[in-house]
């Protein structure tokens, strides 16, 4: 409960997923399989960016 690494709210998480959904809307012609791969790569690069940051 008192972990400083856990945020007090979910705003950053909601923002992250809204950005992901916006990107999927831009590429709305992707097949279901390509959408899955897009999400996997999106999460991979987001994780890499996070690792470089902190």
Image: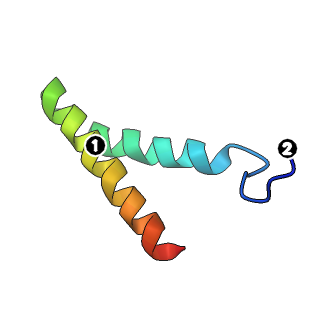
**Disc 2 target residue:** 1
Left or right of residue 32: residue 52: right
Q: Residue at x 25, y 49 (%)?
A: 41
Question: Does 44 sit above or below residue 30?
Answer: below
Q: Give residue 26's quadrant in the image.
A: top left
Q: Residue at x 32, y 59 (%)?
A: 45
Q: Residue furthest right?
A: 2
Mark earlier in primary sequence (1, 2) = 2
Distance between the Cα atoms at labels 1 and 2? 30 Å
Please identify the quadrant where the N terminus is shown: top right
Q: Nearer the viewer, mark 1 or mark 2?
A: 2
Left or right of residue 1: residue 45: left
* Closer to the camera in the image, 27 or 48: 48
Residue 30's disc number:
none
Question: Could one spot residue 30 in this view of the protein?
Answer: no
**Disc 1 target residue:** 40
Q: Position of residue 30 (x, y in %)?
A: 14, 33
* Secondary structure of residue under mark 2: loop
Q: Residue at x 68, y 43 (%)?
A: 10
Question: Could one spot residue 50 in this view of the protein?
Answer: yes
Please identify the quadrant where the C terminus is shown: bottom right
Check disc 2: other Cα within 10 Å, few if <14, some if 14-19, many if 20+: few
Q: Position of residue 53 (x, y in %)?
A: 50, 74
Q: Residue at x 29, y 41 (%)?
A: 39
* Secondary structure of residue under mark 1: helix
Q: Position of residue 18 (x, y in %)?
A: 48, 42
Check disc 1: other Cα within 10 Å, few if <14, some if 14-19, many if 20+: few
Q: Are marks 1 and 2 in contact (CB under 8 Å)?
A: no
């Amino acid at each position: 409960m008192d972990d400083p690494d856990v945020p007090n709210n979910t705003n950053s998480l909601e923002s992250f997923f809204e950005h992901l959904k916006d990107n999927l809307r831009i590429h709305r012609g992707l097949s279901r399989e390509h959408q899955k791969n897009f999400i996997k790569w999106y999460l991979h690069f987001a994780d890499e960016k996070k690792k470089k940051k902190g």
